[in-house]
Image (tube, rainbow, N blue to C red):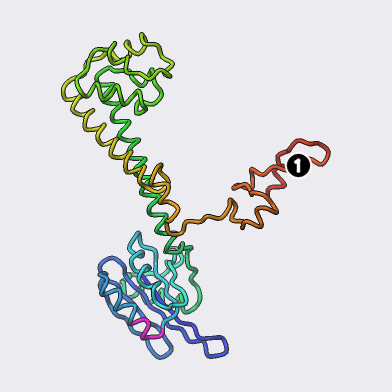
Amino acid sequence: ILATARRMPAIMQANSWTTGTSLKKVIVATVLTPDLAETRSFGTVTEELLALGDWLMACRVTHVAMEATGVYWKPVMNLLESYEFTAVWVVNPQQIKGMPGRKTDVQDSYWIAYLLRLGALKGSYIPSRPQRELREIVRYRKSLIQLRATEANRIQKVLEGANVKLGSVITDILGVTGQRILAALAAGETDPVALAQLADGRIRASQEDLAAALRGVVQRHQQLMLRVQLELITFLDRQIARSPGGGGAGRRQDQNLPGRSVSPPGGATGQETRRHGHRPPYPHRRLCHSENAGHRLPRSRHQLF
């Protein structure tokens, strides 16, 4: 549900313009003014959303509010914020509830318009568009990392089925040594001594322990599964490295992302940083100097609140 309103300056009479909408397949918008109370329906395709924005501008709407409904408010928000509205709000549904009886989209739309006209709604915090874009990219990279961890667990499950105890002798089965041994297992190598010789020299486990842990029975279908899983791990590693926050070119591209801030830690400017030093990111981790001793003492709990 979406609603919009206009408020005249205080020196003039308190006029309000309001609109309400359903955001899935049909948008129901209500404009509420002292002279006009009109409700229209629009589709959710881009052309219909632009028609909604043009209609609201023609009605001299300045304030927009919509109910937060999953992700359906995002395309409406992205298009309406390109218009010259004073404010576009996304409202928590808890603030809108309270209308008893059987509700419809038209009733909800008018109800939001009425509440907005009364000043009873409060918009939720919505980051700026560059911040929202950066947030989507970073969250997608996080999902890639989680997917890689899930695939690593599947590889461990295959190894357990073959009674190969690789995870008991090395910490990371997808490290340098682990990927060498896994690739050899997927290629059909079954000699535990030959597999143990693939280990990196920094591995703490002895060759005898490695050979004992790698002695198992790997079937053909398990070799096939390992090949497919290793290919997926390689692909995910490449995508994570390319994404913002990853290594290599991805990290260099991260500097040009929308909303990327290059200010010093704590948000201080260069001059403030030189004057006050870098501020710690968390207030409860700050340290203070003792007046009588040269060492640093942690702040007490009552000083933090």
Q: In the figure, 37 relative to 227: above or below?
A: below
Q: In terms of secondary structure, what is the magenta stretch mainly?
A: helix
Say whether residue 281 is left or right of residue 199.
Answer: right
View extreme (right): residue: 292
Q: Which residue is drawn at 51% across and 56% down?
A: 261
Where's residue 58, x and y in %?
Answer: 36, 86
Q: Residue at x 18, y 27 (%)?
A: 224
Left or right, 297 with reference to 227: right
Which portion, as a residue range, is magenta? 55-60
Q: Residue at x 38, y 17 (%)?
A: 169
Residue 9 vs residue 30, the one in the foreground: 9
Seen in the picture, residue 209 relative to 263 is either above or below; the reply is: above
37 in the magenta segment: no
Picture quadrant where residue 40 is located: bottom left
**Which one is in front, 280 or 117?**
280
The residue at which mark 1 appears reads as: 289
Q: Where is residue 203 in the image (x, y as percent from the top left)?
A: 41, 18
